[in-house]
Image (cartoon, coloured by chain):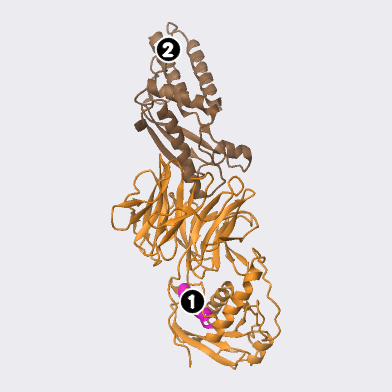
Amino acid sequence: MRASSILSVLAAAALLAACGKKPAPEQPAPEPPAPAHEEAPPPPPPAVNDDAERMKREAEARAKALREELGDMIHFEFDKADIRASDQTILDRKAAILAANSAVRVQIAGHCDERGSDEYNLALGNRRAASAKRYLAGKGVAEGRLDVVSYGKERPLDPGHTEDAWARNRRDEFAITAGGENLTAPK
Amino acid sequence: MSLHRFAFLAAAVALLPLSAEAQDTTHVEGGVRVGITYNPGARPGLVVIPGTGIDSVRAIVKRDLDFSDRFEMIAIADPGSSPGGDAPGGPLNYGLYKALGAEFAVELLSDGDKVTARLHDVGRSTLAQEQSVGLPPPTDANFRLAVHVLSDEIARWATGAPGIAATRILLVQNGRIWLMDSDGLLVRALTPDGQTSLSPAWSPDGRRMAFTRLVQGRGGVFLSTLSTGETTQLAGTETALNITPMFAPDGNHLAFAHSDEKGTDIFVATLGERSVQRLTAGRFADNLSPTYSPDGRRIAFISTRAGPPQLYVMGADGTDQEVLAPFDFGVTGPSYAPEWSPDGGSVVFHREVSGTPQIFVLTVAGQKLRQLTSQGRNEDATWAPDGRHLCFVSDRSGARQLWVIDAETGRVRQLSTPGWARLPAWSRRLAGPAVVPPKP
């Protein structure tokens, strides 16, 4: 369930490591190869302010990790829209991030597995999205920052017809629709 | 005429006890047939007399009469070039038709730019009905519908009730709504490629359709005039998700389900006005898929108020909401997609049986439930105007395709589409058969 956030942490770590290995700016830049075309501009010189550069990259990595946490999906039991206990921590984390970043707006999209009628699943997906919105609103997120949409069973993540595929497809997806550029980590 | 009607009714009544078992089959028991002796449970035998010219008309009429499931279609060898055969206008061979077990013989003659249809009463060796109609050329877009109208009239002569050939079916394929002839020929796409349109519903006059267009997880209800393609959004469906539109029989009201953060509820819009009236108020429950009784006084619908979706009914003003199809909580499978029958006596819907959806018909008075299908997954049934045929979605062939079942004999046939078909809606009769006074 938390695979994406673990991935994002790993990605952030990799980014930081890359920053550390960056060649020192004192070293002379290697001679650029002869330009293939007259009009090709020379590459810009490397950034001079190491600290500012590193802080900027760290902030970006942190924001990226927070964005990914906001995007973590939650899942549902068959024909249910109740928030599972195991998914409450995911939503609690989103509520904390949203509390620390008041400019962020999120769209919650409910999805269903292939069972049940096409039309009923649109209503069920709506109920699943609304369920997450109610939970987040209950944690203090202003309702106006949360949009609810439903795709029913029109957009399965997994096209399979197994219990595993159905479980993956019964989900809420969370998309940042505004204010996701600079995110502050919650205290 | 009246005798035929009586015979047909007697046959229909006699079929009822059989039909409960004879479900969902491509093979129909013909009953015992000895010459022209009438046997309860057997459909009247009918032969379409071979001839030359107007082959396309004859082929369509033959198939339409077969698809009406009201006749035992009797094949007769085409005399072709054999001299002295049943050439158009040639001598009729009542003796031969009798020997084959036919009660009716249909004769189609080309007569200049007209086609003459004749129904012969084989038992009495007489011409029973005759009509000449002007048909558009086969290249004309209205040609097939005009022939279908003729087929339905022939069926009416023989049985007292018109056929269902002059009807069309709306369906969804790859996100587009398509128009299909009742015999399976795709006419054209009605909505553009690249959009997701769902839930087409006919206006009672057959000139318009209502449907849902999904855009990025939201959806509005739209109204489209079939002849021009002119499409407008229904006022009151601009926000959130608006699904499962259904016309009231008066053609002036449209019921639909509106989904927002409080759940899904049924509303009714008066066309031409901006106001909508709310009919259900299920907080955090879903109420959807409204379908009007033909008298416009009641609406059957699906609700999750007690848990899984089940079939309910209410007054058209939202009063007196109650369970329509009885269910045992935790035992009965979820139920979906009701459609009230044209005669008002039944509601068709699909319900999961051991996790597999099957088509059920509920008798409204007495709440008798009958399972119509058993092969594969069967969903989203829609009534033909004769109240005995239903079109539904089935995966029995491996892909989700449209099928038609005759609820009285259980005979099924496939309406093939190149893509995955779903959400069919069967029209009323699109062009009423011409009124022809019976011959003295």
Classify mark 1: residues with Cα within 10 Å, few (<14), some (14-19) or many (20+): many
* Residue named by callout 2: A54
The segment highlighted magenta reads: B144-157
Determine which quarter of the picture holds residue A133: top left
In the rendering, which numbered label is found on residue B147? 1
Quick one: B404 or B281, which is closer to the camera?
A: B281
Residue name at image x 40 percent, y 26 percent: A37
Which percent across, then down, holds residue B10?
60, 79
Residue type at tag 1: Val
Which percent across, then down, holds residue B271?
32, 58
Q: What is chain A's hue in the picture?
A: brown
Determine which quarter of the picture holds residue B209: bottom left
Q: Is residue B16 left or right of residue B254?
A: right
Give SS at disc 2.
helix
Q: Which chain is home to disc 2?
A: A
Residue at the left extreme of this rendering: B273
Residue name at image x 39 percent, y 22 percent: A99
Classify mark 2: residues with Cα within 10 Å, few (<14), some (14-19) or many (20+): some
User: Which part of the image, by quadrant, shows the C terminus of chain A?
Assistant: top left
Residue type at tag 2: Arg
Residue name at image x 53 percent, y 39 percent: A80
Quick one: B283 or A40, which is closer to the camera?
A: B283
User: Which part of the image, by quadrant, shows the N terminus of chain A?
Assistant: top right
Q: Which chain is home to disc 1?
A: B
Chain whose colour in the figure is orange: B
Q: Main secondary structure of the magenta part?
A: helix
Q: Nearer the viewer, mark 2 or mark 1?
A: 1
